[in-house]
Amino acid sequence: MKKAAGAYEQKDMATAVRIWKVWAGKGNAEARTLLGAMYWSGEGVPRDHKEAARLYTLAANQGYARAQNDIGFMLGFGEGVPPPDNVEAYKWLTLAIKGYTAKNQERLDQARTDLAALAKRMSPAQIAEAERRAKAFKPTP
């Protein structure tokens, strides 16, 4: 994983993709998320929001906060996963906020901003359902 991160920082996308694909295939949530980000942006792989969403969802279901944040954003703001799903987006953003640590302050602040924007578009019943789903969430290994 460190070798892939180093390759990514050195703009050696082929090496980063190759390594993260192996780790993602083994179920590593961080690798799934980082590879998803590459598909999201088209770095080192063809841009493919469906594949990014698939990888983010796998990692989000494992309880990985950044993936929860990323799939929540995609679902809530119609970024590559039609149709938007405000209830699921709110659930994932809520879980991401709970999962972030102090070292992720910038991502935490953005997730809170996104959640507030999403809440403005939702009914109280939708928010209650999203909060129920978040509370019932159990990560899968």
Image (cartoon, grey):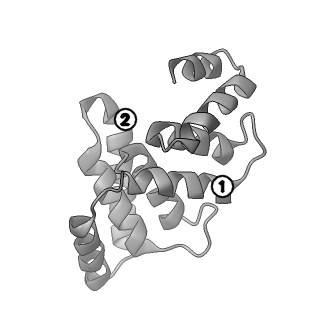
At horizontal 41% and vertical 44% (from top left) the residue drawn is: 66
Q: Is residue 5 left or right of residue 48?
A: left
At horizontal 23% and vertical 78% (from top left) the residue drawn is: 128
In terms of depth relative to the viewer, which is nearer, 110 or 134?
134
Real-space CA distance between mark 2 and mark 1, rounded to the nearest whole angstrom? 25 Å
Image coords of residue 77 (percent x, y): 53, 64
Q: Is residue 137 left or right of residue 14?
A: left
Q: Which mark is residue 21?
A: none
| Secondary structure at numbered mark 2 | helix
Give the residue number, with chain letter if any, for mark 1.
Answer: 51
Q: Are marks 2 and 1 in contact (CB under 8 Å)?
A: no
Q: With respect to residue 72, does 17 lie above or below?
A: above
Task: Please tell me in which quadrant of the rendered image residue 83 appears.
Answer: bottom right
Q: Closer to the camera: disc 2 or disc 1?
A: 1
Disc 2 or 1, which lies upstream in sequence? 1
Image coords of residue 68 (percent x, y): 41, 53
Amino acid at circle 2: Glu
Crowd band around label 1 with a 10 angstrom C-alpha radius: few (<14), some (14–19), many (20+): some
Q: With respect to residue 49, does 8 lie above or below?
A: above
Amino acid at circle 1: Glu
Q: Which mark is residue 106?
A: 2
Task: Please tell me in which quadrant of the rendered image residue 54 appears.
Answer: bottom right
Residue extending farthest right: 46
Task: Please tell me in which quadrant of the rendered image residue 53 appears.
Answer: bottom right
